[in-house]
Amino acid sequence: MTLRRSMLFLPGANAAMLSTAFVYKPDSIMFDLEDAVSLREKDSARLLVFHALQNPAYREIETVVRINPLHTPFGMQDLEAAVRAGVDVIRLPKTDSAADVQQLEAEVARIEKACGREAGSTRLMAAIESASGVINAVSIATASPRLIGIALAGFDYVMDMQTERGDGTELFYARCAVLHAARAAGIDAFDVVYPDVNDEAGFLKEVELIRRLGFNGKSLINPRQIELLHQAYAPSAEDVDYARRVIAAAEAAEKAGLGVIALNGKMIDAPIVNHARRTLQRAEASGIRH
Amino acid sequence: MKIIKPALAGTLESSDLQVKVAPSPDDTLEVVLSSEVIKQFGQQIRRVVDDTLARLEVKAGLIIIEDKGALDCAIRARVQAAVLRGAACEHIDWEKLS
């Protein structure tokens, strides 16, 4: 299970940030070649990201590149650069249908073959940013075995819905639709960015909401938000204690050849054991919530 | 790759560098390097610049570099961006850029 709580956005044209972002230790780093890069810097940002991806400092962190849409003059070159540089995941913006993912998948396969990269080693992620995307979330989430997750992107989505960011009511349906599609497909779900980096209380309130809904994590625009997010996702001491007992019971049952796991007289099934493993993984990564 | 027009890439922000390229009137290759860390890393920066230019097969041109403490990956990227712009290159050979 790959932990994906925090996905830190980095503007692809910013050499200083690209040179240092690994020190913040988010779960994933997303080099942005799309909205964060002006039209006249698309070429130089692409080259910066191409070389940053090959920096050994990024070997221990999952790397993601948000390319420009493939129908723009930049998308295909972004894809060539990212796949050839060894990126872990390509994030496709403005995904409206399964066909968008399948087109991306075909191009990625072509580039992997051309550059000698292992077939299938480039994973994909689809960002849903429109009403059409939300409606098609299930077919998008199941469009390719390369998909590791789908993300909701809030700004474009609320524009498409002719509304604006507020207390989260405006995102409620989209969050639930994207999350259910991801879970049905067995992939991860990522929530929107929280734009006000100075509003810590508002950020934590939103994180608590999306954590309880079941999102794996959130896109972030400032390193200051990483520790807050990880701490909010850290399990409590009681959660960890219970998870350890569940795992111990599961291991004991397996050793005894029992098909049924019991703890304190209650039956435990596989989803509970998996949840316990995730709890311990989060505790190992972020400690205990305080 | 032939530099046919003046071009610029990068910034003067910390951890970045600015690279200016121009065609050479006498068909020679001249690299002018200034850096805040020239004493400690001048040779290393120069090695990265020369290697990047050689891979791009740049044989002539004036290359002016003002470094603000950039990492090797940023140096390669900015030199390549300036050269590709100066050469008005439309098709990128990624093998040469690695």
Image (tube, rainbow, N blue to C red):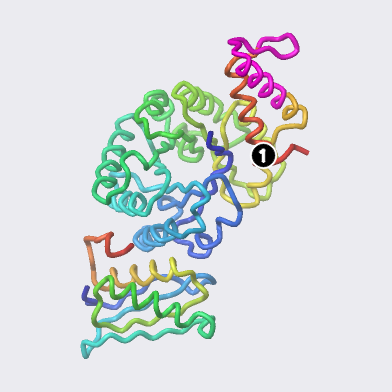
Figure quadrant of residue A37 = bottom left
User: What residue is shown at x 68% (from left), y 44% (from top)?
Assistant: A228
Q: Which residues are magenta?
A: A243-267
Image position, residue A260 (x, y; %): 61, 10
Q: Is residue B83 left or right of A244 when viewed as pictured?
A: left
Furthest residue in direction bottom, as rendered: B26
A79 relative to A277, above or below: below
Tag 1 subunit:
A
Q: Position of residue A106 (x, y in %)?
A: 26, 38
At horizontal 24% and vertical 74% (from top left) the residue drawn is B57
Q: Observer-nearest residue: A254 or A271?
A: A254
Question: Is A262 within the magenta?
Answer: yes
Residue B24 spot, x, y in % from top left: 25, 86
Q: Is residue A121 above or below residue B59?
A: above
Could you say where residue A119 lies in the image, as x and y percent from the top left?
31, 40
In the image, B23: left or right of A122? left
Q: Amino acid at mark 1?
A: Glu
Would you name the residue on which mark 1 appears? Answer: A284
Callout 1: helix, strand or loop? helix
Left or right: A244 as drawn, with respect to A126: right
